[in-house]
Amino acid sequence: MSAEDRAERRVADTDLRRYVGALFVHAGMADADATLLAETLVDADLSGVHSHGVLRVPEYLRKLGEGGVDPRGAPRVVGALGGCLVVDGGNAMGQVAAMYAMERAIERVGTQGIVAAAVRGSNHCGAVGFYARRAAARGTIGLATTNALPTMAPWGGAEPIVGINPLAIAIPAGRHPPLLFDGAFSGSAHGKIRVYAQRGEPIPEGWATDRDGRPTTDASAALEGLLLPIGGFKGIALAMMMGILSSLLSGAAYGTELGDMARGPRAGLDGHFLAAIDIAAFEDPVRFRARVDAIVDEVHNSRRASGVTRLYVPGEPEEEARARRGVEGIPLNAQTLADLTRVGQLRGIAPLAFL
């Protein structure tokens, strides 16, 4: 068990899903949509990605209330041409719209080879790796990206007009779990800095600046400043490209059109871009997965740097965290637990039990 896991109280993932799902049902969501939304958040915490986990529950409940998001929003396909789909999210929670789009892509990929869905009329969709993994679980390659509120400046600039606009790619393997890259093009997500602030811990260097543009390791100061890109100007360029894919193809909002961190996003203007690729349209799937396994084995068996005990491929640390925390429980910090307890008490939801 890691030091982080020991320092925080643990909750069984099944109990946490049930509790969070009940909160969203109380907010007016249909049972299936509430279950999906709870699943995506708890999966992020299981993976150790607390920035996209249940700490967002109070924020999401506000969105479903006075925030203007429709708890009963129903996504639908509004345009289709070959392997291209346009989906209107119906102002639903982004998780509902993004999963609907990915499922439609997976359904059609066997006859099209590649199916891509551009989504508009949506809202914050959480960790995009969740949708890419869903495609990989069905034997296809999955891609997912989304727009985000602007928190970075263009290279050399000082004004937040670029979102961190993450990208996820999941590739099926044979003996090994799917490879998964899921990352934003900033040093860290805004939500992750919130986790550091809740714990009262400094953030690593290179993640953010304060409001005056000075690099900082103070998490609270970073929340008022700018996120810094990975790879210098390349990170900004990639973030812009993902933002355009996520927004302009469907007519969704891009960058500052979506809103800002001070006032939050405008409901129903988020956009996503999701795609499924049928391996069999290009290559024998058995041979493909065997070659992916060989790539993983090559990484595992290659020479390690001094002091390194294990080499990982993309997605392995999160896969191991899910397995470990599925047994030991999910560690949640005091602030997150207090927030969950408060919103549950307001709605008469039975309190969480701890392990």
Image (spheres, grey):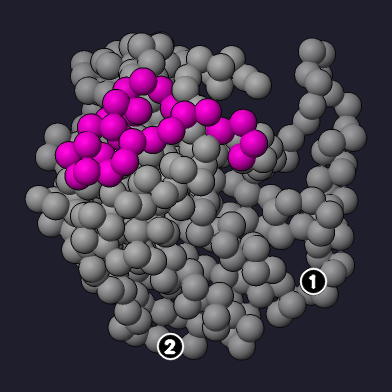
Q: With respect to residue 152, does 86 lie above or below? A: below
Any part of residue 149 in sight: no
Magenta span includes 86: no
Residue drawn at 68 percent across, 58 percent down: 171
> Disc 2 residue type?
Leu
Residue 322 at what x, y percent from top left? Answer: 62, 40
Precedes in sequence: disc 2 or disc 1:
2
Q: Which residue is mark 2?
A: 81
Q: With respect to residue 32, does 129 lie above or below? A: above
Judged left or right of residue 52, residue 71 is: left
Judged left or right of residue 2, residue 18 is: left
- In this view, the residue in front, 288 or 194, is 194
The part of the chain drawn in magenta is: 326-355
Image quarter for residue 19?
top left
> Disc 1 residue type?
Pro
Q: Which residue is mark 1?
A: 285
Magenta span includes 343: yes
Q: Residue lying farthest left? A: 66
Give the foreground label among 2 and 1: 1
Any part of residue 344 in sight: yes
Residue drawn at 23 percent across, 32 percent down: 342
Secondary structure under tag 1 reads: helix
